[in-house]
Amino acid sequence: PASAIPGDLITQSGSGIDPHISPASAVLQIDRIAKARGLAREQVNALVSAYTEPRQFGFLGRPRVNVLALNLALDALRAQP
């Protein structure tokens, strides 16, 4: 249902200027990314967790996933023999 879609997936622009999404948005896409990249769901989930940044200074903003860094890590997995 539409209510299950994190708000940032609906309201953020597709410009790519801000390289962050919410952890909920990243988790929603794990299965699709794993399938598209030929990886195990657990591998992608571990990387999403690794690239989830906490609130700045412990209280500002919200936790977020650095999509640019995550994509670079996913690309590095593909480059391994």
Image (cartoon, grey):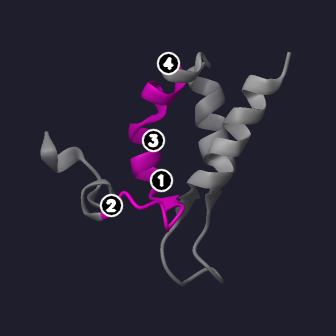
Position above or below: 64 against 34: below
Badge 4 marks a residue whose secondary structure is: helix
The amino acid at mark 2 is Asp
Which callout, 3 or 4, points at the residue further toward the start of the chain? 3
Measured Cα–Cα span from mark 1 to mark 4: 19 Å
Question: Circle 1: is it few (<14), some (14-19), or many (20+) Cα within 10 Å?
Answer: some
Q: Which mark is residue 78?
A: none
Which residue is painted at 57% across and 74% down in the image? 55
Question: Looking at this view, is 17 or 4 the one in front?
Answer: 17
Which callout, 1 or 4, points at the residue further toward the start of the chain? 1
Measured Cα–Cα span from mark 3 to mark 1: 6 Å
- Report which residue position mark 3 lands on: 27
- Report which residue position mark 4 lands on: 35
Q: Are marks 3 and 1 in contact (CB under 8 Å)?
A: yes
Measured Cα–Cα span from mark 2 to mark 1: 10 Å
Q: Which mark is residue 8?
A: 2
Q: Are marks 4 and 2 in contact (CB under 8 Å)?
A: no
Instruction: Name the image quarter holding residue 27.
Output: top left
Question: Looking at this view, is 15 or 49 the one in front?
Answer: 15
State the residue lying farthest toward the front: 15
State the residue lying farthest toward the right: 81
Badge 2 marks a residue whose secondary structure is: helix
Magenta segment boundaries in residue numbering: 12-35
